[in-house]
Image (cartoon, coloured by chain):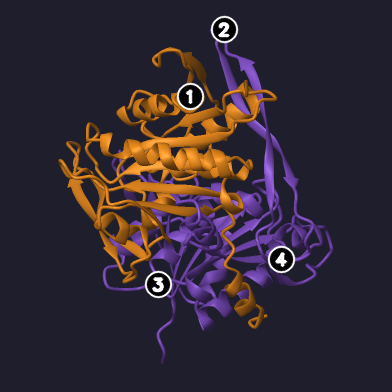
Chain colours: A purple, B orange
């Protein structure tokens, strides 16, 4: 009998979030699951790692029949601890992160703790996927994502990840009674945030700020993740950890 | 008389670090300087932003004749606050970050707070450069970087940044009495960290970990940033905030 594939699960909303529970349940149908996830929410942490402070790691039994650990660090720390400390010589066949509450489409991928876990795994040469739903409600509907999660994870287990990328998968917010239109392979939409800092005064009379803002999709293409989400498709963007813009390398060569 | 260019300076080692002092001094020879930098070290913060907590911003007079602010947030927060709160309708002609104490070559760019400030600026459409020296001594030599910093910053002011990228500039650790061999435009080397978690026991008997590791350059190319640094060149890698791997988009299209 062939060994079951080993699937490492992490996230950035923390080990007690609804999203990771659904993901663990789905991954248990595909293989042996191990969880290493932050013990507190890490949204917006980008690809942060913990180097100036110590890390804590405790085993946790909240998932029935699943070996799980909670970690004081970031999603990227969780993947590093799993790969280089907990697993010894065992190598995961797949690393999945999420399901994140909130969009990681377009430029949001840069700030995403969810995707940092997946990208960290890709750097390690492991097939990796980050899943997010474009719904900021922490108790939002996730059932509409289940079928595509299984399809994308199964495909990735079968094929491996293309060209050392991590897959950035986003689902639209559920529309009651409506099935998703399908899966679209996309590029990252060209967009930005127009930040609006909400300035307030604390009880001691000092100013403080909340970061808020408006997302502006500057991209007219129909091949982007933003287009897919707006049209009720699941978007899949293969994300590279090599940030080099090779065309720009040539252009810069003329400056010096 | 033409207006002087406006140059925004940030970093991730904090507003009191040696590296930012040198960078401010150099940028003052090229234009009007404004500083918005973290009030504490933010190394390893990647592209983190502050969304679950409030931000503080205080004016600071540690740089003679320079408008400066210290911020409780991350390098990316600093750029957002400068662009969308402090500067009003004024648009910086250049955003520089650093000089970081420690290497941001190769895969290290993913974890880099220094580069997150520059990439955040690139998302805003601003020419941007992150400067780092491959020397972990916080009082390490920086004088050998000065000439190239001015050359690269002047070129960027003149040309703008190519193709919406941010430049990731790294300098080798100074070798006494030896001038740098030149500037090389490079791609990001394919490399990884082999982490080694240093496990210790605290006075209460609980385990904790320090993240340590060994950097492994898997790349044999002579066109990489790692090669440049090893051969005592300044490396310049144009980094894209579009993570899409377009070849992988095609490959994935066959899966579904």
How many residues crowd around disc 4 within 10 Å: few (fewer than 14), some, or many (20 or more)?
many
Q: Pointer 2: what residue?
A: A205
Total residue callouts: 4
Q: Are the numbered discs 4 and 3 placed on the same chain, yes or no?
A: yes
Question: Which residue is at the far bottom?
Answer: A1
Question: Which residue is at the far top?
Answer: A205
Q: Are the numbered discs 1 and 3 placed on the same chain, yes or no?
A: no
Which mark, residue A9? none
Q: How far apart, in angstroms, are the residues tagged by discs 1 and 3?
A: 45 Å
Residue B55 rendering spot, x and y as whole percentages: 54, 25
Which mark, residue A92? 3
Residue positioned 48% across, 19% down in the render = B68
Residue A91 rendering spot, x and y as whole percentages: 35, 73
Residue A206 rendering spot, x and y as whole percentages: 55, 11
Residue positioned 57% across, 51% down in the render = B162
The local secondary structure at tag 3 comes to loop
Q: Earlier in the sequence, mark 3 or mark 2?
A: 3
Q: Pointer 4: what residue?
A: A234
Callouts 1 and 4 close, C-beta under 8 Å: no
């Amino acid at each position: 009998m062939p060994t079951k594939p080993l699937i490492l699960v992490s996230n950035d909303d923390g080990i007690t979030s609804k999203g990771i529970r659904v993901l663990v349940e789905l991954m248990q149908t595909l293989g042996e699951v191990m969880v290493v996830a932050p013990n507190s929410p890490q949204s917006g942490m980008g690809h942060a790692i913990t180097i100036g402070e110590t890390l804590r790691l405790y085993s946790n039994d909240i998932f029935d029949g699943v070996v799980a650990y909670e970690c004081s660090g970031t999603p990227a720390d969780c993947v590093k601890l799993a790969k280089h400390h907990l697993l010894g010589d065992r190598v995961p066949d797949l690393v999945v992160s999420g399901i994140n509450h909130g969009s990681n489409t377009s430029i949001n991928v840069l700030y995403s703790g969810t995707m940092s876990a997946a990208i960290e795994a890709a750097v390690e040469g492991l097939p990796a996927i980050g899943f997010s739903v474009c719904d900021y409600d922490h108790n939002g509907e996730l059932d509409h994502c289940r079928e595509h999660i299984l399809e994308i994870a199964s495909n990735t287990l079968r094929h491996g990840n293309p060209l050392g990328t991590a897959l950035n998968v986003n689902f639209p917010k559920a529309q009651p009674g409506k099935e998703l239109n399908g899966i679209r392979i996309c590029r990252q939409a060209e967009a930005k945030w127009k930040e609006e800092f909400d300035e307030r005064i604390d009880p001691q009379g000092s100013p403080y700020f909340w970061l808020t803002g408006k997302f502006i999709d500057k991209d007219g293409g129909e091949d982007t993740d933003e287009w897919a989400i707006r049209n009720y498709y699941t978007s899949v963007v293969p994300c590279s950890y090599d940030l080099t813009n090779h065309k720009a390398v040539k252009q810069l060569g003329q400056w010096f």
